[in-house]
Amino acid sequence: MVVVSTEKKTLGSIKNSASCSLSEEIFQKVSFFTPEELLSSLDETAAEAASKEETVRGYKVKVKYRSLNASDTSARKQAIAKTIVEAMRRMKEQ
């Protein structure tokens, strides 16, 4: 279960009330995030899920993916947008 709040103070108070009212076993299954932290956590979870080990031509191959931080993600999006814009300009010129 995930609890998301934009304010850390609200998130802290929800966490305190949940720890008092929920059993320890259930409370450990609850995660508390701000929206930014939630996106980072989802990226990390997706990267871990995509990591795998398989056999290729008799060799064991381990593939590990890592999540990107916010600056790398925004830089990657900008690079992709720039490439698309340049491709569209070239197509217009032809």
Image (cartoon, grey):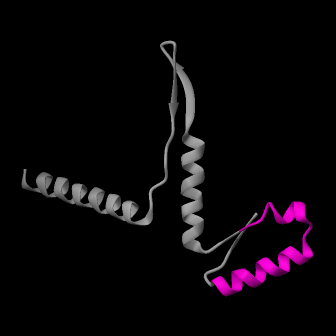
Q: Answer left or right for 53 relative to 13.
A: left
Furthest toward the top, the residue is 58
Query: What are the residue bounds of the magenta stretch?
Result: 8-31
Q: Answer left or right for 36 relative to 15.
A: left
Q: Answer left or right for 82 relative to 89.
A: right
> Is 32 included in the stretch rendered in magenta?
no
Which residue occupies 51% across, 12% down? 58
User: Residue 64: horizontal and vertical position, in percent?
Assistant: 51, 39
Q: Is residue 47 above or below residue 40?
A: above
Which residue occupies 58% across, 73% down? 35
> Is 17 included in the stretch rendered in magenta?
yes
**Chief secondary structure of the magenta span?**
helix
User: Residue 18: horizontal and vertical position, in percent?
Assistant: 84, 75
User: Residue 61: horizontal and vertical position, in percent?
Assistant: 50, 25
User: Residue 5: horizontal and vertical position, in percent?
Assistant: 65, 79
Give the quadrant of the N terminus. Answer: bottom right
Q: Is residue 22 above or below residue 85?
A: below
Q: Is residue 7 above or below residue 81?
A: below
Which residue occupies 14% across, 58% down? 89
Which residue occupies 52% across, 30% down? 62
